[in-house]
Every structure is written in C-alpha cells, then in structure tokens.
Image (spheres, helix red, strand yellow):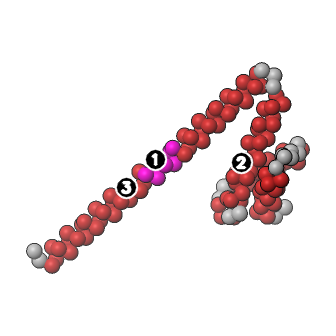
Amino acid sequence: MSKRVAIIIAAAAFLVGVVAGGWSVGAFYNRLTSRLLIGSLTSDAITTVDDLRRLRAGDATNVVELLEIKLDGDLIGLDTFLADPREFTRDPLYVKSLQKVRDYRTEFPHKTDSPDVDRGVAEAFTLLDAQTNR
C-alpha cells in the first residue's frame, strides 16, 4: 500500500470517527435534555393538579403558600443564571418576567421560616437590579 493510499484511508477513518462521535454526543444530549424536560413538566403537572384540587376544595390558603414556596425555589434556582449577564440578557423576556415577579413580591411580601431561603430570594432580586441598573 502506498503512502498516499494510507493517508487517504487514515483521513477517511478520522472523518468517519468525527461524524460518528458527533452524532453520538448529539443523541446522548438529546436524550438527556428530553428526560430532564419531561421530568420537569410532569412534576409541574402533578403540582398543578394538586393545587387545583385544593382550590376546588376551598383550600386557597394552602395553595397560595405552596405557590409562594415554589416561587422561592424558582428564584433561588435562577440565582446562578442571574449572575452571568450574557445568559440573563439573552432574551428580554427573562428580565420582564423577573421584574413581574419582583413587582408581585413588592405587592405581596413573603417571608419564610428559613433565613437561607429569604437570603437567596433577596440575592436573586439584587442580581436582577444589577442587571437592569435599577
């Protein structure tokens, strides 16, 4: 086998490896994100059903408290993304949504029994203020 043929075979093998590797990573990532998204959506659906059942049973107070706790968790979860202005400002809807949350919390203040949770929520709003120069 000549040197030229060996180089062509090696290049072809490398190209096939790159394509197969890229396809494998893409398929793995797709399955992973699909599972995460499905898990999140089904969890939200179950929580919504529970909240709706409580509301229909006239238990609005507990539903409000559960939704406030969920909102605290959402804000704390977003804390990491708020710290990176590139991620946060990629879509103007992010800022508008969080401003709406802050306006809600200004109108209806909510404190928990956990200083860590309250501090995490306050930090999310502080980072929002820093991002929006408010």
Residue under the point 20% across and 69% down: 9
Image coords of residue 50 (percent x, y):
70, 29
Q: Which amino acid does label 3 sit on?
A: Trp
Rendered residue at 77%/47% (across/down): 72
Q: Is residue 126 above or below residue 62?
A: below
- How many residues crowd around disc 3 within 10 Å: few (fewer than 14), some, or many (20 or more)? few
According to the image, label 3 marks what residue?
Answer: 23
Q: Does the magenta stretch include residue 31?
A: yes
Foreground disc of the pair 3, 2: 2
- Which of the two discs, 3 and 1, labels the residue nearer the N terminus? 3
- Residue 85 in sight in this render: yes
Q: In which quarter of the image is the N terminus?
A: bottom left
Q: Name the residue under label 2.
A: 74
Nearer to us in this view, 18 or 69: 69
Give the residue type that dot 1 points to: Arg
Looking at the image, is mark 3 or mark 2 earlier in the sequence? 3
Q: Residue at x 77, y 37 (%)?
A: 66
Image coordinates of residue 90 in percent, x first then y, are: 65, 59
Single out the mark in the foreground, 3 or 1: 1
Query: Which quadrant of the view contains residue 87?
Result: bottom right
Which segment is the magenta one? 28-35
Q: How far apart are marks 3 and 2 (CA)?
A: 33 Å
Instruction: Give residue 36's position: percent from left, percent from top.
Output: 55, 45
Q: Mark 3 and 2 residues: CB-CB less than 8 Å, in contact?
A: no
Residue lying furthest top: 57
Identify the main secondary structure in magenta. helix
Q: Mark 1 points at which residue?
A: 31
Magenta stretch: includes residue 100? no
